[in-house]
Image (cartoon, rainbow, N blue to C red):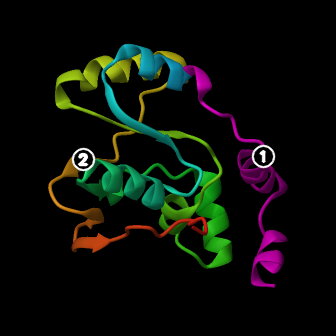
């Protein structure tokens, strides 16, 4: 109910942008192929279950942890506006929302700038570096106040 009520207070343009991104995502097939062909990317996954959960899949399978820096998470103006009306954090949507099929990948420092060039040529902008791989287990959100475990906070399939 709250969400439907809030939708009436969001401009049509903002609502259309968000709905289009959610209902008609643009799979990054060309980018994925280029990253694979480069041989420089260590792991990659599409964000269908949310950044927190899909990054946790990478970490679990690679037996490592990850630290995500809150200030590096990209959040559109449209999402900020909608979040304000819905009374929820845009960061929550950014970390746990899925089905946008953006790519999340890891690359060693040695190849970072070369992979950034490849990705930016295809995307039309520099890719966002949201964190780093660390020793240990779990996915942690780094804020100015410390770190919070955000492992598996997106969608999880029944197993």
Which of the pair 101/19 is nearer the observer? 101
Q: Which residues are magenta?
A: 1-30
Secondary structure at badge 2 equals strand
The residue indicated by pointer 1 is: 20
Secondary structure at badge 1 equals helix
Separation (CA) of disc 1 from disc 2? 30 Å
Which of the pair 86/138 is nearer the observer? 138
Task: Pinpoint residue 89: horizontal percent, then vertical percent.
Answer: 52, 71
Say the numbered circle drawn on residue 135.
none
Horizontal arrangement in the rendering, residue 75 relative to residue 64 (left or right): right
**Residue located at (56% from left, 40% from top):** 102
Horizontal arrangement in the rendering, residue 10 relative to residue 31 (left or right): right
Of mark 1 and mark 2, the one earlier in the sequence is 1
Crowdedness of circle 2 by 10 Å Cα count: few (<14), some, many (20+)? some
Queried whether the magenta region covers residue 4, the answer comes back as yes
Which of the pair 44/4 is nearer the observer? 44
Queried whether the magenta region covers residue 22, the answer comes back as yes
Q: Is residue 124 visible?
A: no
**Residue located at (48% from left, 64% from top):** 91
Say the numbered circle drawn on residue 132.
2
Which of the pair 81/99 is nearer the observer? 99
**Picture quarter with the N terminus:** bottom right
Crowdedness of circle 1 by 10 Å Cα count: few (<14), some, many (20+)? few
**Picture quarter with the C terminus:** bottom right
Toward the bottom, the furthest residue is 1
Task: Pinpoint residue 83: horizontal percent, then vertical percent.
Answer: 62, 68
């Amino acid at each position: 109910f709250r969400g439907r009520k809030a939708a009436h207070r969001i401009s049509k343009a903002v609502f259309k942008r968000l709905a289009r991104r959610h209902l008609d995502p643009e799979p990054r097939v060309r980018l994925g192929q280029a990253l694979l062909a480069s041989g420089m990317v260590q792991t990659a996954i599409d964000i269908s279950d949310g950044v927190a959960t899909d990054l946790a899949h990478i970490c679990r399978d690679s037996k490592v942890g990850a630290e995500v820096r809150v200030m590096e998470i990209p959040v559109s103006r449209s999402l900020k506006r909608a979040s304000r009306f819905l009374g929820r954090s845009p960061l929550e949507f950014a970390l746990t929302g899925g089905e946008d099929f953006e790519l999340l990948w890891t690359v060693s420092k040695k190849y970072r700038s070369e992979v950034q060039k490849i990705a930016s040529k295809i995307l039309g902008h520099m890719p966002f570096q949201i964190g780093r791989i660390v020793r240990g287990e779990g996915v942690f959100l780094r804020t100015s106040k410390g770190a919070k475990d955000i492992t598996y906070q997106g969608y999880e399939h029944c197993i």
